Image (cartoon, rainbow, N blue to C red):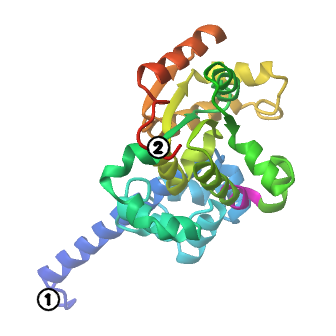
Amino acid sequence: MTARLGLSADSIGDDLDEDAVVATLMEQVGDRVRKARELKGIPRRLLSERSGVSPRYLAQLESGQGNISIGLLKRVAIALDHRIEWFVGEEDPWNSEALRVAELFRCSDQVTKSSVLQLLGPALDQPQRARRICLVGLRGAGKSTLGKLAGEQLDVPFVELNDEIERHAGMPISEIMALYGQEGYRRLEADALDRVISTFDTALLAVAGGVVAEPETYKRLLSHCHTIWLKASAQEHMDRVLAQGDDRPMSGNPEAMAELKTILTSREKQYEKACFQLDTSKVSLEQSLQQLIGVINDNGLLKSRGSPQ
């Protein structure tokens, strides 16, 4: 039978190998698309609307079963504000040092580009971080409240990165999102971080929870700041936001809590890259504040490390 079809055992084996390679690639693409979507906190239905790809097809894609065309994958990449090669390349964009360096250089201003060799120097880790401390975590973790109070007690400038973005853009975040979308906001976020790094040697910084969804921006943050992950349960995140009078997390979305848990779970590995962790669950504001100050003082994060004064 094989001879009549003109197929040899070797050619059949080659076909099977190629099928396995394709299957592996589709699993990789699906996993990376799902990871990118969850890190950005984008429900599948919203990604469908942005990309024009049906929810059913997206579900197949994320499960590794969708044999997606390049054109459709490009739409998905644009909707997620990622380059298409992130999904099909051999290296994992969230963990590839080579891709990180290349993208950092491509997106950096001229001052940063001129000092790229110094930035890559292994001995410059501590001077790069200087006395900059950054609080990361999901919305409702207490970054703004604790950051401002700690800054006052420690006599350190407190910087809310979103405030810096609004000040430079001349409009609130809501308008930025309406006019420029996620892609425009993330670009402004990266630029704002660069300005903070170049302006402050000593500062306490709070960033939006979604900063971890942008590998280059987050890795730049990790390398230039002492990072502290403020942790809390999904329920506490939600309760704190609602207590602030913001009902947007729940408004018109009965699945809001499930989506919040998904976002928290998907981002945990990125938040865990922070230098320190502080769990604020079931702890009073004053206790959390003293614990935060303890982490800063006990680890000498505000002591001079040879950086410019």
Q: Position of residue 261 (x, y in %)?
A: 58, 30
- How many marks do you count on the picture? 2
Q: Amino acid at mark 1?
A: Ala
Q: Which label is found at residue 129?
A: 2
Q: Position of residue 120 (x, y in %)?
A: 37, 60
Residue 212 — which label?
A: none
Q: Using the rendered image of the protein, determine whether residue 67 is visible from the camera's viewpoint.
A: no
Labels 1 and 2: the sequence-earlier one: 1
In front of the other: 263 or 291 = 291
Residue 9: give x, y in percent of width and height. Answer: 12, 80
Q: Which residue is pictured at 50% across the width and 47% down the height?
A: 308
- Per the image, label 2 sits on a secondary structure element best described as helix
Quadrant in the rendering for residue 6: bottom left
Residue ID at (37%, 58%): 96
Q: Residue at x 83, y 32 (%)?
A: 251
> Does residue 161 appear in this view?
yes
Q: Nearer the viewer, mark 1 or mark 2?
A: 2
Mark 2, Cα crowd under 10 Å, few <14 / some 14-19 / many 20+, is many
The residue segment tinted magenta is: 181-186
In the foreground, 308 or 29: 308
Where disc 1 sits, the SS reads loop
117 is higher (above) or lower (below) than 296: below
Q: Is residue 58 above or below residue 83?
A: above
